[in-house]
Amino acid sequence: MKDKQIIEQLHLLQTVKPDAKTLRLIRKRIPAQGIFNKGMNFRKLFSVTQLLPLTAFAGIVIIFLIIMIFLQNIFTSAWISATIALAPNHYEKAKIALENVQNQLSSLKDNNADSNKLNNLSQALALANTEMSGLQLVGEKGKYTSYQCEELYEFYHKDLEQTQNVIISSKNNSGESIIKQAVQYDNQAMSKLKRYNEKRWMDKN
């Protein structure tokens, strides 16, 4: 029954013949909807094509900044190593290494203590400790005196104390290893200062 009813309704629809005015109205509506849809698609396409260059540009800028930071670290390390290598004596080498530590500490004070800056500070401390360990207690004739060595060790001791304070104030858990490193180096520095004081006392007596 249902199929017969559907067929009869279809036959009725076939008999319907719209007049010319109705057909014109139908034709007007169909193109208008097509244009509207095309406009919508064009706006979507335009927004996507506009976002792609901006996203690519942002990605290039981020990559460029990362490369610049990386290259800056390499250049700074190479420059310090070259300057130390060309220094006329071990006292001057140690001074350059300590200046590098102070620069790294200043950078930590001015900015957040991120992992990159902490790593740079750790490397600077290791380099300074190596150069300070090479100083002769009695000095080297015509190059530097025992008193200059002692003074430099006093500065080194202060830098190591400052390092611990800066890391603690930054409240960065990743800086704990640097605190241990600074404490170890400071114990060595204090041992050297004690030997300087003993030598001075023996010279007076």
Image (cartoon, rainbow, N blue to C red):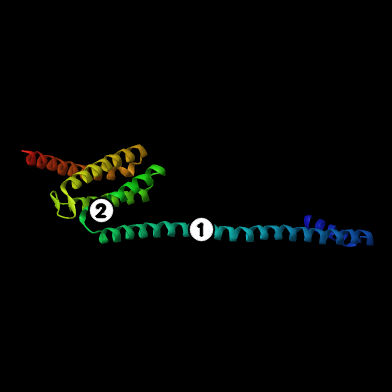
Residue appearing at x 35%, y 57% in the figure:
76
Q: Which mark is residue 76?
A: none
Q: Is residue 101 above or below residue 74?
A: above
**Residue 121: x percent and y percent?**
32, 49
Q: Of tags 1 and 2, which is closer to the observer?
A: 2
Quadrant location of the N terminus in the rendered image? bottom right
Front residue (pair 94, 1): 94
Q: Earlier in the sequence, mark 1 or mark 2?
A: 1
Residue appearing at x 46%, y 57% in the figure:
65
Amino acid at circle 2: Leu
Indicate the secondary structure of the residue bearing disc 2: helix
How many other residues sit within 10 Å of disc 2, few (<14), some (14-19) or many (≥20)? many
Quadrant location of the C terminus in the rendered image? top left
Front residue (pair 193, 138): 138
Q: Which mark is residue 61?
A: 1
Q: Is residue 183 above or below residue 60?
A: above
Q: Is residue 183 left or right of residue 67?
A: left
Report the Cα–Cα distance between label 1 and label 2.
33 Å
Front residue (pair 61, 125): 125
Tally the numbered discs. 2
**Residue 103: x percent and y percent?**
35, 48
**Residue 36: x percent and y percent?**
77, 58
Indicate the secondary structure of the residue bearing disc 1: helix
Q: Which mark is residue 127?
A: 2
Amino acid at circle 1: Val
Quarter of image, res 57: bottom right
